[in-house]
Amino acid sequence: MGIRDDAVQVRAQGWRTLAALHNLIEGDLERALQREHGLSVVEFTVLDALGRQDGWHMRMAQLARAAALSSSATTRLVTRLEDRALLTRILCVDDRRGIYTELTAAGEKLLNEAHPTHDAVLQEALENAAKVPELKDLVTAVAPANA
Amino acid sequence: MGIRDDAVQVRAQGWRTLAALHNLIEGDLERALQREHGLSVVEFTVLDALGRQDGWHMRMAQLARAAALSSSATTRLVTRLEDRALLTRILCVDDRRGIYTELTAAGEKLLNEAHPTHDAVLQEALENAAKVPELKDLVTAVAPANA
DNA sequence: AACAATTCATTGCGTGTGCAATTACTTGCT
DNA sequence: AGCAAGTAATTGCACACGCAATGAATTGTT
């Protein structure tokens, strides 16, 4: 086992740790958001991305990027949220292939309600993860001076 | 905006960064492993977890934990791999509810073939991520002294 | 020893996802 | 102007996933 092999092991271990932390946080968020607001993590992510634009539009492709989803999944996700009247599709006038999406009042309301849940659960998940020895360092890298 | 609010923003941003990096790496691994070995990331993860036990068994629940999957998903995943003759189910004698899984020779072979791909793609993905300013710090936390 | 409570794994069912093909529109080339 | 190539979003399809209910074996209780 030389130096090169060690680096491989370090990366593999690091990747497993990253995946573990990601999964832990996402699991907690998923359960909490679903239970309290009927939202999945991706759904929240999309609403939040739109909310951060504050009154401005986003195209489907941008949304797909923000949610780390394929374009087809994004189409259906937007359809779901539109059916729940949380956002609206707006046809572009300048490029009639493109579609803008915008939060409705109900969407903004739900987002504002869900945000405290999201933030609290995220904090708690990070605190819990920081107690796990093999996750601790990564946690502080994600959120410096946590807990 | 006080100190408390800042911490919330930092965590939210950190979580988005973590998710972004995770997604980047997983996407690259998924494509490469699928294309070159017909394996998904979870499938590789399970084979790798078994391989790291080196000749010893793992129960379904352990596998589920290692792959961050539900028990039902694990059942079907193991079934898939068993159908491809990459691993075998072994009934426990001491606890006849439990089931051990073990790599077959073909499973070990495929794992050995896939490992270089996995490691190379992981390295490359980390190097690419390190070039993205907002991911750089997290990358070095995952794999110190990378690139 | 017999029965309730628990645990491990599997199956039914509904849902979200990606890939590939498709539709609608725009851009570039001649 | 007209047609090919490219791009944005949507749909068909197959598949992997989680939850809840089930089957099978263990552990605990009286």
Image: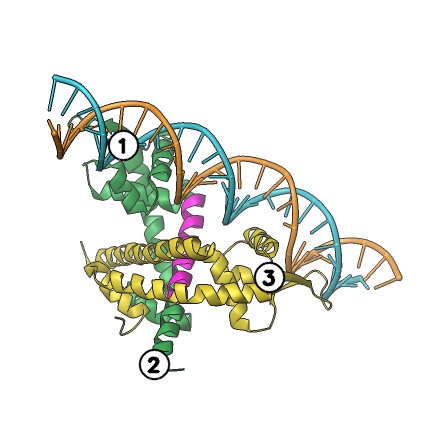
Chain colours: A yellow, B green, C cyan, D orange
What is the three-letter code of the residue carrying label 3? Leu
Q: Residue at the location (32% across, 33% down)?
A: B86
- Which is nearer the eye, A15 or A120? A120
The extreme bottom residue here reads B2
Element at label 1: helix
Classify residue D29 as left or right of residue A140: left
Classify residue D30 as left or right of residue D1: left
The residue pinned by badge 1 equals B105
Task: Indicate which disc, 2 or 1, sits on the residue closer to the N terminus.
Answer: 2
Please identify, in this view, whether the residue under mark 2 or under mark 1 is nearer the observer: 2
Subunit of mark 2? B
Classify residue B30 as left or right of residue A105: left
Is residue A3 visible to us here?
no
**Whether marks 2 and 1 lie on the same chain:** yes
Q: How far separated are the C-alphas under marks 2 and 1?
A: 57 Å
What is the three-letter code of the residue carrying label 2? Ile
* Structural crowding at the residue carrying mark 2, measured as other residues with C-alpha within 10 Å and reported as few (<14), some (14–19) or many (≥20): few
Classify residue C21 as left or right of residue B51: right
Q: How far separated are the C-alphas under marks 2 and 3?
A: 32 Å
Residue A87 disc label? 3
Specify start and end residues of the magenta stretch as a single range: B15-34
Q: Residue B23, percent across and down?
A: 42, 57
Task: Identify whether A144 is placed above or below A127.
Answer: below
The residue pinned by badge 2 equals B3
